[in-house]
Image (cartoon, rainbow, N blue to C red):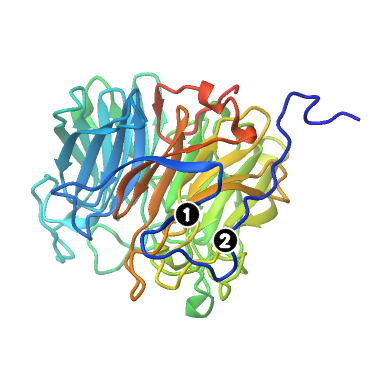
């Protein structure tokens, strides 16, 4: 009999044992599986120490990690993962400030109405005179990033995804929730914005296309009874440039796109799950490009959904196999995955941002679950995913829900980096036979939503 060991592959581990049912850690208490541990933490520093200065997404380049914050972004030196250091902090308010990096350029998403496009802007409720969109910085000197320009996009930029090209990059800008009262965010908004940035002249960045992905309007939603959001744009898009594919998580719809022409992405498959998915939030391909993991951000990230009342199939991951070829490819549902540990009713917890761990021959992912912590899980068998490790803190409060926890948890060059909304940057390590050799895969640059391939 041919075994996984005979192929030189690790055999599946038993699921990481959860604490006893009902055994919830105390406030700020750290618990983990035996194969995971925290090796460093840098708390949020002024001017980002406030409870509303949420830590958000992460991009990597060389020995640096760029971490977004609702009030700007932070540059960390991670050359020594056990002793990361802050290189610089840039005050530039405007949620969510999701980040990506390309050479000397950093891109920042603004999805809140601001008085203008500068870093000294103020929040405004004016429905006509306001600015939202993409900001561009020169980070050739990471200790002193410089503002370059900004590009306004309809409905702002909740997230963005970098698509590399020969002498330029494209940014797929995801935004949603239009309103007739908003001058630059009119319904139906069934599109994305594509910002083109010439690398030799980033100041000339501009909106180059606005492809409509949902000419039929997309999922109409199901109202408050089920909480299924109507599709009015996309929340997040992951591209896999070497495969010419993208996966869009678009509120009420999950889509597979052909991006062989980056300025004209084509939807080739669309799926809905009106039974268990309330808000299609993000997507991750496996390395072979034969599967997509979609996340359901039930409750918008601010609700306690990791409890017995919600159950194991809502606020979870949905695993889909990609079958067929060319425009005949389809997404076939295989299973759900959700962390097996119940969280307190004062903890916001739901499936959130994660990345692959580069293990040859297996599909393993690390993922943030807000106050549910960080989970490492294996979906090599699409129908039978299993958790192999976890790390988490107890609730921020035992009396009331305070928004917090891991926003993004990503593997980069041998370690897991977690951006915690309230606690700053955490560095974790996992030691398990299933991830052996992953630390030998090195990337010079990593924007997780611009998915690279690896050989392992």
Q: Secondary structure at mark 1?
A: strand
Tell me if 96 is positioned left or right of 322 in this view: left
Give me the residue at 53% from left, 49% from top: 390
Residue 120 placed where, x, y %? 8, 48
Which callout, 2 or 1, points at the residue further toward the start of the chain? 2
Residue 168: numbered disc:
none
Which image quadrant for residue 447? top left
Q: Which residue is painted at 58% across and 73% down in the image?
A: 308
Q: Is residue 151 above or below residue 213?
A: above
Residue appearing at x 60%, y 28% in the figure: 436
Picture residue at 52% right of the left edge, 30% below the top: 260
**163, 317: nearer the viewer:** 317
Q: Is residue 97 left or right of residue 237?
A: left
Q: CA distance from mark 2 to mark 1?
A: 9 Å
Quadrant of residue 136 within the rendered picture: top left
Q: Is residue 153 left or right of residue 437?
A: left
Q: What residue is shown with label 2? A: 19
The N terminus sits in image quarter: top right
Q: In screen coordinates, is 24 left or right of 153? A: right
Locate the C terminus and report the quarter of the image it occupies.
top right
Is residue 247 visible to the viewer in this orientation of the structure? no
Say whether marks 2 and 1 touch (CB < 8 Å): yes
Is residue 440 visible in the rendered image? The answer is: yes
Categorize mark 1 by other alpha carbons within 10 Å: few (<14), some (14-19), many (20+): many
User: Residue 277 in the image: x percent, y percent?
Assistant: 56, 64
Q: Which residue is mark 1?
A: 31
């Amino acid at each position: 009999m041919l075994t996984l060991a005979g192929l030189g592959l690790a055999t599946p581990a038993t699921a990481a044992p959860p604490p006893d049912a009902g055994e919830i850690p105390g406030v700020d208490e750290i618990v983990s599986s035996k194969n995971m541990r925290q090796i460093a933490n840098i708390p949020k520093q002024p001017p980002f120490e406030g409870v509303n200065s949420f830590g958000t997404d992460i991009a990597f380049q060389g020995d640096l990690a760029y971490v977004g914050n609702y009030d700007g972004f932070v540059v960390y030196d991670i050359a020594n993962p056990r002793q990361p250091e802050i290189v610089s902090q840039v005050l530039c308010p405007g949620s969510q400030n999701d980040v990506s990096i390309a050479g000397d350029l950093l891109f920042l998403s603004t999805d809140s109405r601001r008085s203008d496009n500068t870093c000294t802007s103020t929040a405004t409720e004016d429905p006509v005179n306001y600015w939202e969109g993409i900001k561009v910085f020169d980070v050739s000197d990471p200790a002193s990033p410089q503002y370059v320009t900004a590009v306004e996009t309809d409905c702002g930029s909740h997230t963005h995804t970098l698509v590399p090209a020969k002498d330029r990059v494209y940014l797929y800008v995801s935004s949603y929730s239009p309103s007739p009262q908003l001058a630059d965010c009119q319904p139906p908004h069934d599109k994305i914005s594509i910002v083109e940035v010439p690398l030799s002249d980033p100041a000339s960045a501009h909106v180059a296309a606005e492809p409509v992905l949902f000419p039929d309007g997309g999922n109409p939603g199901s109202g408050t009874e089920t909480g299924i959001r109507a599709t009015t744009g996309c929340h997040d898009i992951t591209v896999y440039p070497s495969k010419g594919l993208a996966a869009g998580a678009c509120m009420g719809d999950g889509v597979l796109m052909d991006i062989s022409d980056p300025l004209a992405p084509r939807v080739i498959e669309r799926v809905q799950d009106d039974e268990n998915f309330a808000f299609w939030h993000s997507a991750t391909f496996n390395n072979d490009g034969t599967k997509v993991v979609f996340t359901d951000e039930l409750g918008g990230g601010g609700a306690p959904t990791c409890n017995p009342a919600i159950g194991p199939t809502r606020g979870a991951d949905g695993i889909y196999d990609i079958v067929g070829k060319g425009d005949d490819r389809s997404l076939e549902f295989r299973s759900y995955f959700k962390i097996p540990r119940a969280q307190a009713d004062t903890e916001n917890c739901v499936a959130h941002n994660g990345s692959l761990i580069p293990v040859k021959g297996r599909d393993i992912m690390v993922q943030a679950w807000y106050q549910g912590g960080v989970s490492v899980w294996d979906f090599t068998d699409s129908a039978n995913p299993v958790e192999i490790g976890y790390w988490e803190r107890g609730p921020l409060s035992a009396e009331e829900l305070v928004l917090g926890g891991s926003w993004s948890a990503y593997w980069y060059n041998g370690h897991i980096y977690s951006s915690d909304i309230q606690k700053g940057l955490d560095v974790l390590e996992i030691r398990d036979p299933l991830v052996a050799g992953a630390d030998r895969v090195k990337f010079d640059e990593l924007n997780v939503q611009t998915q690279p391939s690896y050989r392992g």
